Each structure stands twice: as C-alpha cells, then as structure tokens.
Image (cartoon, grey):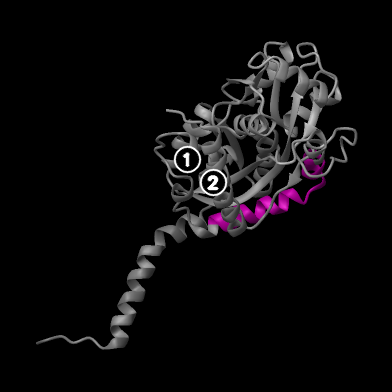
Amino acid sequence: MKRTFTTSRRGALKMGLAASLAAPSIARAQAWPPGTITWINPFPAGGGTDTFARPLAAQVGEQLGCQIIVDNKGGAGGTVGASQAAKMKPDGSVFFVGAIHHTIAPSIYKSLDYDLEKNFEPITMIALVPQVVSINPKRVPAKNAAEFLVYVRANPGKVNYASPGAGTAHHLAGELFKLETKTEITHIPYRGAGPAMQDLLAGNVDMMFDGMGTSATQIRSDRLLGLAVATPQRLPEFPDMPTSAEIGVPNWIVSTWYGLWAIKGTPQPIVDRMYAEIVKAMATPKMQAIWKDQTAQMGGEKPADFAKRIRTEIEKWQKVVAAAGVKLD
C-alpha cells in the first residue's frame, strides 16, 4: 500500500530530525562545566596576557566550581598557540585568550593555518591597556621625549627597541611611531613580552613600546623612563607623563587589548555562560583593583561588539602594515 505524508507529519519529522541533531550539543552544554577548563594563552608566561588572564581565570573558575588552567604556548607573535587552539574540540573544555596581535597577524604573515574570524567564536574583551613608549635611562641619554627624538634622529639605526615578537601590537606600535616621527629605530623581536621586558631592564636593549600592564610598575620604580602614553588624554595614574600629541606625534594612538574566544562550534549556551561569568567576575572589587593597578580599562563588552572590534582592528592594521612594508614568512 502506498504511504502518504501530510504537511503536518513532514513538519514533525523535520522537527524530530533537528532535535536529534541538536541533542549532542545540548547534552554537552548541560554537562558543562567539566572539572577542568583550559585557556590557551599563545604567549610566554610573564607577559601582559598573563597579567589579566590568570587572576580572571582563577575568579571565573571559583564561580563555576572548577579549575581553569592558563596554558602558555608562545611563539611567532602568538600565532603558534592560536593555531593549536583552533584545532581543539569545540566542547567547552578549551578556550583561547588572545590579544590585538591576532588582528595584525593576517596582514603580516604570508600564510596562517587558522582564521581568527572563522575558527573562533568571540566572547568578550577582557582588558584594554594604553601603550607607552619607554626607555632604559641607563642606555639612552635622554630625560624626556624631546631629548630622545633629537638623539635618535642624530643616530639613525643606533637605538633599538624590543617587542614580544614580530607582528605583535608592540612591534606595529613601534613601526607606526617610526613612520610618524620619521626616525630609524632597530626592531629586536623576542618570544613574548616577559622576555623582552627582562632584557630591557637588564640593559640589553634600549627601549620598548609596551602596554602599561607590564610597564607601569617599572616606570613607577624609575627602572624605566616613560616618554609618552599613546592616548588622547593623560592617564590619571601618570599625570606627569605627556600624551603622544603633546610630544608632537598626534597620530600615534595605540592600545593593547586582550580577549577571550571559544572554539568555533562550541554550544551557544556554553559561550553565553562563560560571557556571563566573566562579566560577573569583572564586577568584583578584587578584579577591579587589579585592572586599576595596571591602568587598564575593564572589558565585558558583548560578543557582537567584540566581533565588530576585531573586524575594525584587522582593517586598521592592514593599512599600517602596508605603509610600513612589514612582511614575515
């Protein structure tokens, strides 16, 4: 006997099929969080990402009742760890804590085996830190920005600057500074902000374009001399430090930001829950005190707004990379 199906029965079958396909995702979300969650940090320990990721991970883990491990996988300006994270299972057990550097990488590297916008799901920005240009006063004979610019122009190529790696925001901040000041400063890349800062403090390099998150303590202790902050207004924490405009470089406006992504395909309820827990954590006095001490702006913007920030930054740095003529293998 020929079997016929009514429209309502077809609809019921479609709904049943959709439900069966969604069931594994729903089950994973309901079983979340697992006992341990990993946040892959694609930079070595001791850098700006660690400054914010580690206390935030501890607070969020406490709220969720599980352990969140920050796993450092540094190399190639953060692209090695990003590549590893992109290949992880989207089951909510692994997240990626990256930075502005990852919006620069597509323009500066000839080939990447991951796509920031296709392989990751934006959750939120966790911190935004203004950049500062600082020198080791024992190596560079300058007491302020004006003296520094006179010296570096009189000695093209002699002064060098450290960065956490080629293609990082620190590197591009330096290249933008050179373009705007028409100076010649030699770039020395390191495998992370921590090693770069250590060598700067040890007197092995002259200067650094760095986020206040890792430079503030060194400037306060006079181990480094902050020449200018890359913001439109002076920072309340450093009222005596001039802005980039005040030293004659008005277009040198750069901030280093850090963010959290899920692996693309992670169930939406897990993404939503992680976002909610981060916002909750950032409202605690403990987190706010840490961010303030680092002269950082609290994050917590909605995932859609974070996605827009990522797209805007990618387009911005494409122009800077093209102007500076920077390319890496």
Would you call the spot at circle 1 few (<14 residues within 10 Å), some (14-19), or many (20 or more)? some
Residues drawn in magenta: 270-291
Q: Mark 1 falls on what kind of element? A: helix
Lateral position of residue 153 relative to residue 234, left or right: left
Instruction: Report the front residue among 228 and 126.
Output: 228
Image x and y of residue 49, in percent: 64, 34
Among all residues in the image, which is located at the extreme left? 1
The residue shown at (33%, 81%) is 11
Check the picture and name the quadrant holding the N terminus. bottom left
Lateral position of residue 62 relative to residue 239, left or right: left
Q: How many numbered marks appear?
A: 2
Amino acid carrying label 2: it is Ile
Image x and y of residue 127, in percent: 70, 43
Residue where numbered disc 1 is placed: 106
Check the picture and name the quadrant holding the C terminus. top left
Amino acid carrying label 1: it is Pro
Query: Residue 21, relative to residue 6: is it above or below?
Result: above
Would you call the spot at circle 2 few (<14 residues within 10 Å), some (14-19), or many (20 or more)? many
Residue where numbered disc 2 is placed: 314
Image x and y of residue 222, in percent: 85, 20
Contact (Cβ within 8 Å) of mark 1 with mark 2: yes
Query: Residue 98, relative to residue 276: is it above or below?
Result: above
Q: CA distance from mark 1 to mark 2?
A: 8 Å
Q: Quadrant of residue 217?
A: top right
